Amino acid sequence: MSDIETSTVSEEGFTSTSEVGDFELTIDALGEDGPDPNSVLVADYASCFLPAFRVGGQQRGHEDLGRVQIDAEADLDDDDDLAAIRFDIHVEADLDEETLADIVERAEGICHVHAALREGLHADITAHADAF
């Protein structure tokens, strides 16, 4: 038996609906009826990296980072393939740059999406402390 099972259906056109456990996700290659696949991948990457960042903070002795927000952006190449991803991470806690870099490095080792992407597509990450 597999660890993860999904089912994706498209009745017509370029919109598909994926069932992931008890959840449904509509994705549209044209971005009209839902987010496009590249946008979903960038959002998925950020939604995986954020809890990894929190765990990295805990492992580095920072139990309460407060609010954490990732503003993600990505570039597409001429074939509409993802070419670059950037994360701006805003952290409520007042941390020095060395601590932030240490937490980012640890989060990179924890995030499963980060591990699954080709190295050339790993996010370029900038973290900002005392951000809120």
Image (spheres, rainbow, N blue to C red):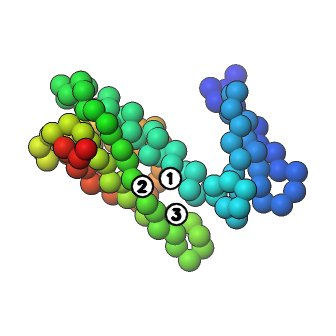
Residue 99 can be seen in this image: no
The answer to which quarter of the image holds residue 59 is top left
Amino acid type assigned to the residue bearing label 3 in the image = Leu
Q: Position of residue 105 (x, y in %)?
A: 26, 42
Q: Is 32 situated left or right of 47 in this image?
A: right
- Numbered mark located on residue 102 in the image: none
Q: Residues within 10 Å of mark 2 (few under 14, many from 20)?
A: some
Q: Are marks 1 and 2 in contact (CB under 8 Å)?
A: yes
Q: Are marks 1 and 3 in contact (CB under 8 Å)?
A: yes
Front position among marks 1 and 3? 1
Q: Quadrant of the C terminus?
A: top left
Q: Quadrant of the N terminus?
A: top right
Q: Are marks 3 and 2 in contact (CB under 8 Å)?
A: no
Query: Which residue position holds label 3?
Result: 82
- Numbered mark located on residue 72 in the image: 2
The residues bearing labels 1 and 3 have C-alpha atoms spaced at a distance of: 9 Å
Q: Residues within 10 Å of mark 3 (few under 14, many from 20)?
A: some
Tag 3 secondary structure: strand
Query: Which residue position holds label 1?
Result: 42
